[in-house]
Image: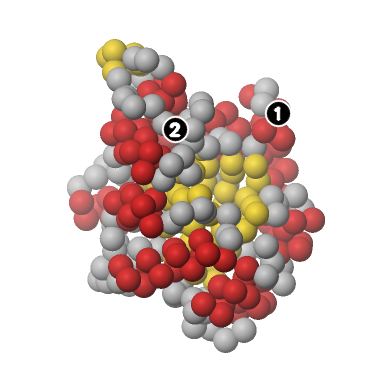
Amino acid sequence: MLISTKLAPCFEYPVLEEFWRTSDELGFHAVWDYDHFYGLVDPSGFTYEGWTILAAMAARIERARIGCMVTGVTYRHPAVLANMAVTVDHISGGRLEFGIGAAWHEPEHRGYGIEFPSNATRVAMLDEALDVIKLLWTQESASYQGRFYTLDDAQCIPKPIQDPHPPIVVGGSKPKMLRVIAKHADEWNTPTTSAEDWTKMNATLDEACAAVGRDPKAIRRSVQLFLHPAQEGQIEALLETLPAYESAGCEHVVLSFYQPPTRSELERCAKLL
């Protein structure tokens, strides 16, 4: 089972950089950040922009893969996002994991005047956005006429280093989202409270794959788990649940830290690699 680390860009840059470098040194599969503009624990705290930070990660991390878990589809036009992702893929030497989802944090949208459609509409936007992004990554020029997005002989140059494109990691758990995941994703990720809940969602994804004619084995199954170093014993208790996830078919665990861990705490997690 692959194990990755994640730390939201809500801490001073030197703290983030130390976390990235230590995770890379210890051999974790990937290092992730997130795509929000407000701190989720403290909205008044500062938050660096996720893709700008991802470019910095690409230049600082030497071996681990990198990604944003996950990009909100409502925040950027998919053609702009496709170009951003190609840039980061090149900076990293082809180590980008392209994480994306339907977005959910309404206060950010309201504060910035970004439209926040219904859940169903945002899922439909994600479906179209992934069509657009894959066309731009793989076609010399691309035209597209959809409900939300239009391309007219559009170009994205250069193309990604990774062939045919960076792995697409889609986060979500609801039935409509799982159908989009079944159609587009190379990896599925979701946060959950228990291995039992994850197992049920995993089975539902198998059903969604059957509905769209996709081989379920084509999609790597992963989970995001939240670690709180400030809570004594919480990390150890959570790590003890990993065998249950692995037995249920989970192939990749993302350890998402709410506070920057110490080196010894990261080393404890790395022993499971």
Please report the residue visible at 65 percent of the width from the left and 54 percent of the height from the top. 2
* Residue 194, x across and y down, in percent: 67, 63
Q: CA distance from mark 2 to mark 1?
A: 26 Å
Please report the residue visible at 56 percent of the width from the left and 35 percent of the height from the top. 185
The quarter of the image holding the N terminus is bottom right
Please report the residue visible at 60 percent of the width from the left and 33 percent of the height from the top. 182
Q: Is residue 213 visible?
A: yes
Q: Badge 2: few (under 14), some or many (20 or more) residues near its Cα, within 10 Å?
A: many
Please report the residue visible at 36 percent of the width from the left and 19 percent of the height from the top. 146
The quarter of the image holding the C terminus is bottom right
Under mark 2, the amino acid is: Ile
- The residue pinned by badge 2 equals 161
Does 155 sit left or right of 227 as displayed?
left
- The residue pinned by badge 1 equals 215
* Residue 18, x across and y down, in percent: 41, 70
Q: Badge 1: few (under 14), some or many (20 or more) residues near its Cα, within 10 Å?
A: few
Among the two numbered marks 2 and 1 on one chain, the one whose residue lies closer to the N terminus: 2
Q: Is residue 81 visible?
A: no
From what the image shows, is residue 90 above or below residue 252?
A: above
- Residue 131 is marked as none
* Residue 35, x across and y down, in percent: 36, 53
> Which structural element holds mark 1?
loop
* Residue 215, x across and y down, in percent: 70, 28
The quarter of the picture where residue 224 lies is bottom right
Which of these two is toward me, 102 or 188? 188
Under mark 1, the amino acid is: Asp
From what the image shows, is residue 238 above or below residue 124?
A: below
Does 33 sit left or right of 1 as displayed?
left
Which of these two is toward me, 82 or 102? 82
From what the image shows, is residue 116 above or below residue 262?
A: above
> Which structural element holds mark 2?
loop
